[in-house]
Each structure stands twice: as structure tokens, then as C-alpha cells.
Image: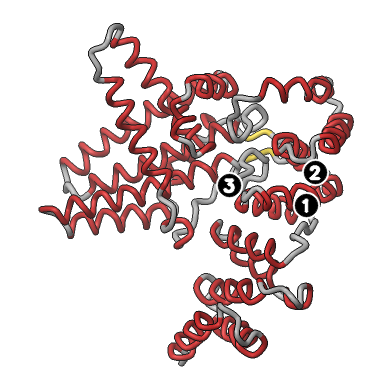
Amino acid sequence: MTYYCCRANGKTDIMKGKPIPIWQNFPGVFRYGFRPQPLLLIAGMSVLLYLSSGGILSWATSVILDAMLFKYAFVVLQQTARGNMDPPPLNLEVLAGDYDLPLKFYALILAFNILVGSDMPLAALVAFVALAAFPASIMVLALNESIVDAFNPVLLWRLIIRVGWSYLALIGLLFILQIAESNAVGLLAGGVHWIFYHLVTGYFAILTFHVMGYILYQNYAHVGQPVDEEEDAADARLAHFESMMALGNKEAAIAELQQLIVEYPDDLGIHRRLHQLCLLERKGKDLFRHARSYMPLLLREGRDAQAAELYQDCRALGENCAPDDAEGCYRLGRALRGAGKYREVIDLLNGLHKRFPRSDFVPHAYFLMARTLSESLNKDDLAVKALRFIVDNYAGHPVLPDVKAYLAVLQTDAP
């Protein structure tokens, strides 16, 4: 995912490319958890835990809902880190599917608890270092999605150095959130009703991940993605680019990156830097020209969500960088739907059969469009038209049974 572009829905100086420091907008952090999506999630979890209290059912429900909460929290961190200050939607793409990150997060918590509670020599120092590095481990886990990287002291130190003094601010902000959570639990769960315990802890869990994401976003110019141990070699190639940036010569810096991409066409790090710089400088034409090579590379590497961010960035500057094949459009549409960009899905996929009349991916794309129209935009009439188009024009296609079943449901529900 391209997290560190400066296209936020929150308080951001887009022209200068400098997010407002989080300590100047801390009240907005607390308001984030009261937005409809996170509030609905934690309220629903609290009610379900209350109704299932007692016995093995309560334990199983708690495990499942906690995993769902942290699945959502990691998406919050990742989206906030790229400047998206709107909470993720509560849909199947966000809440269901891959629970790899929450499981790795639990392993991370277990390991740090062991370190903090150990009786090894210099135990106090080890515990202090472990606690101080824990936020960095979570951020590396969110960026690299690797539990090994989350324990790698070189990567943790590299991230902390990149973030700089803001990391100390992050520690302070997380400490404030812990105090606020403790007070809220004592007031509500202790003084009013214990059902508020899960509401309060879920609320502050989401705020914690939002704060970590914002710190990454605030330092987008210094934090690359993913955190990579092989950056020293890349730095040598980027020496002239860095010198041009230091002099404030953005035009020369863009030209240098464009030349580097000619020499290293598969280097995602160089592509990412050029994309971010063009975006920050509002260089729409350069951004679009670069997207012609960047978009296929992202899709070839399986980075569909990152490709969706690139597509949105191009649209924000009035450019269209849709893929040149139906499969790419279909995959991009799935990633956009997962990010809650439903109207963008329709704009991308509508009329796809005219562009790619012979592609077997068009029925898949139109089925995705129909589900988006019905489930996310409440336009069942248009969804039915898309489904009937598939039935009438793609007889024998493997997706046809699912299409007919979905069409039958919509027609049954129709007034």
C-alpha cells in the first residue's frame, strides 16, 4: 500500500505536503473513535459479549470478536498512515478474510510479555527497551506484514530513527491514552456497568492504532514502505536525487527519479518516491506518465491495494490510469471496493465489455459491479441490468451459476 502520499481527508496542507502534527489536532483523535463505523463495531461487540457472558461460549465469542477488532484496527493504522482520515467501512473485505495480522499481533504481545516479565540479567533494562520498542514493532508489522521483521532490531531502530523525535511524542500520546482508558474503565465499567468495559477498551484500541498510523503519516517524507534492510544500496543510487531535494530543486529531483526508473524499471522503492513527489508537487502529467509503468508493476507484484491508491491519486489530479487489460481492471475494482470506494468501482468497470470484448474477466468484473451496486449503493435496478447482461452475453461462463443465483435473490426481494 502506498501509505505516505499527502492526500488526506483530515487536516492537511496538501500544497505544501505537510500534515498538521498530531499534538496540534489531538481532540480530533478522540473524535475518530466516535465516527459511525468504529462506534458501530465496538458497540456491537460489547452487546454480543454481554449477551454471551458465561462459560465457554463467552470465551470463544471474546476470542473471535477481539480478532475482528484488531483486524479492523490494523486497517485503521494502514489507511491513516497514507493520509486517509476516514475510518474504514464495515464490509466483508475489511472484517472477513485474512486474519494473518491479528494472529501475528497476538504472537507479538506474547513475546513482549515474556520479555517484560523475564528474570534474565538486566531484566529492568530489557523490559524498558521492549516496552519502548513495542509501538515500532506494531508499525513494522503493519507495514511489512512479517512477524520476523516485527522482531528485527535493525528494522525497529531504522523506523524509530526515521520517525525521529515524533517517536517520543508517540510514546507520550500512547501513555495519555492509557491513562484516559484506565479512568474511563473505572468510571463507566466500575461505576455504571461492566458492559462498558468492552466499549471503552475497544474504543481506545482503535484510537491507539489511529495514532500510530498518524505518526507514520506525519513523517511520510522519511518513512518508506515497506521498511527494508537493503536500503543502503538504494541510498547510493539516490544520492543525486537527495542532493536536489536538499537544494529545493524538485524539477531536477523528478527528472533524476525518472532516469533511475529507466535504469531500474522494477524497483518499487524508486517508483514510490517518484509517485509521492509528483503527487506532492501536483504534477498531474508526470504522475500519469509514470503511472503507465507503475500500475502494471504493482499489479504484477500482487500489490492490488497499492494499485488502488495509485488509481485514486491519479483521479484526484484529473488523470485516469486504469489498467490496459480487463483482469487488471477487475483486480483494481476489488481493491477499490475493499477500501470503500464504491462509486470509483462503478466508474472503473462500467462499459468494460466495449474496451475488452474478448476477455473472460469481463463477467467477473460485471458481477463485482452488480454486487457493489446492490450491496453498497442500494441500486438493485442497475445491479439487475448488469446481471442480465452477463446472462444474455456470456453463456457457459464459469461465473454464470453465481450470477443467476444472485439475480434470483434480487428479483425475489424486488417489490
Q: Is residue 100 left or right of residue 328?
A: left
**What is the CA distance from the residue labelled 2 to the residue labelled 3?**
18 Å
Q: Nearer the viewer, residue 70 or 84?
A: 70
Say which label, 3 or 1, has the lower sequence index: 3
| Residue at mark 2 | 282
Q: Relative to the observer, which residue lies in front, 39 or 94?
A: 94
Mark 2 falls on what kind of element?
loop
Kind of residue indicated by mark 1? Leu
Would you call the spot at circle 1 few (<14 residues within 10 Å), some (14-19), or many (20 or more)? some
Query: Can residue 45 be seen from the camera position used here?
Result: yes
Q: Does residue 348 lie above or below 142 as drawn?
A: below
Please tell me in which quadrant of the rendered image residue 324 appears.
bottom right
Amino acid type, callout 2: Arg
Q: Residue at x 28, y 26 (%)?
A: 113
Asked if residue 17 lies left or right of residue 135, the reply is right
Amino acid type of disc 3?
Asn
Residue 306 image position (x, y, % from top left)? 63, 48
Q: Determine which quarter of the picture holds residue 366.
A: bottom right
Q: Which mark is residue 317?
A: 1
Residue 99 percent across, percent down from the top left: 40, 50
Q: Quick one: label 2, few (<14), some, or many (20+) residues within 10 Å?
A: some
Residue at disc 1, secondary structure = loop
Q: How is the image coloured?
A: secondary structure
Q: Earlier in the sequence, mark 2 or mark 1?
A: 2
Q: Do the residues under discs 2 and 1 have CB atoms within 8 angstroms?
A: yes
Residue under pointer 3: 84
Residue at left offset 53%, top offset 24%: 155
| CA separation in Å, label 2 and label 1 | 7 Å
Residue toward you, 122 or 267: 267
